[in-house]
């Protein structure tokens, strides 16, 4: 508040005396700096990200999320629980997209189910100060699928069968051919083919 007041006093003083040196000394770099920032964003040199801290209760999981949220528990999220307690905050934002015409939720979680579960658990266990850090993006379903796949492809706690079924659903929804899908995911066709074959495995064998 005092800094703003000082700048205001300089402006008034300069107007009375006709001297604008004080104003330039304090604020000379502000407007050019902002202009440079906006120019870099428009030109594509800088990525403008929308990060927010929200109540996890206003976020739901995307229906095509890789992870089975119902299987998350204190044991599977132990590392995140301890990490957030130690750091005092969530370091990496979950990726979400804005929902329209949903009376119960405002955002849909594309990547970050464990982070969402962990923050929710902490808030229910004597850490109400924690909020869910999100990054809002404008994504199509196909873009959301690819983003989720990139983040979770190497996660060991997501089984091959879950991943295979996800790929099988995506092939029918977002891609015309297996070749198109492999190209978009930047994987080899035979690698993808093995997963698609796994998705067709008989339920009795799986059981």
Image (cartoon, grey):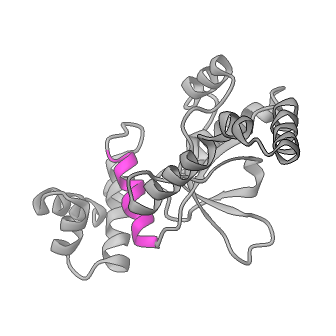
- Would you say residue 146 sits in the magenta stretch? yes
What secondary structure characterizes most of the magenta part?
helix
Q: Say which of 17 and 28 sits in front.
A: 17
Residue at horizontal 37%, vertical 71%?
169
- Would you say residue 151 sits in the magenta stretch? yes
Which image quarter: residue 5?
top right
Count of number-bearing discs: 0
Question: Quick check: 180 above or below 22?
Answer: below
Q: Position of residue 10 (x, y in %)?
A: 82, 38
Q: Say which of 91 and 196 sits in front.
A: 91
Which image quarter: residue 73?
top right
Q: Position of residue 163 (x, y in %)?
A: 35, 54
Q: Say which of 7 and 75 sits in front.
A: 7
Question: Which stretch did the figure color magenta?
Answer: 141-153
Q: Position of residue 63 (x, y in %)?
A: 55, 65
Q: Position of residue 7 (x, y in %)?
A: 80, 38
Residue 203 seen from this side: no
Residue at horizontal 77%, vertical 47%?
55
Residue 21 seen from this side: yes
Residue at horizontal 40%, vertical 57%?
147
Q: Quadrant of the N terminus?
A: top right
Give left or right: position of 14 versus 175: right
Give left or right: position of 96 versus 194: right
Q: Residue furthest bottom?
A: 176
Q: Residue furthest front?
A: 17
Question: Quick check: 73 above or below 144?
Answer: above
Question: Quick check: 140 above or below 92?
Answer: below
Question: Quick check: 167 above or below 177?
Answer: above
Give left or right: position of 184 versus 203: left
């Amino acid at each position: 508040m005092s800094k703003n007041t000082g700048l205001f006093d300089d402006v008034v003083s300069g107007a009375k005396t006709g001297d604008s040196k004080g104003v330039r000394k304090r604020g000379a770099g502000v407007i050019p700096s902002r202009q440079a920032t906006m120019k870099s964003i428009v030109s594509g040199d800088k990525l403008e990200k929308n990060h927010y801290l929200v109540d996890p209760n206003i976020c739901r999981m995307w229906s095509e999320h890789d992870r089975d949220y119902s299987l998350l528990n204190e044991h599977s999220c132990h590392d995140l629980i301890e990490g957030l307690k130690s750091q005092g905050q969530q370091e990496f934002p979950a990726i979400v997209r804005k929902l329209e015409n949903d009376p119960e939720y405002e955002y849909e979680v594309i990547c970050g189910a464990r982070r969402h579960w962990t923050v929710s658990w902490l808030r229910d266990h004597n850490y109400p100060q924690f909020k869910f850090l999100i990054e809002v993006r404008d994504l199509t379903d196909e873009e959301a699928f690819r983003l989720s796949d990139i983040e979770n492809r190497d996660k060991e706690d997501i089984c091959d069968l879950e991943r295979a079924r996800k790929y099988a659903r995506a092939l029918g929804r977002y891609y015309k051919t297996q070749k198109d899908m492999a190209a978009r995911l930047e994987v080899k066709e035979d690698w993808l083919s093995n997963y698609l074959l796994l998705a067709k495995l008989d339920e009795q064998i799986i059981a």
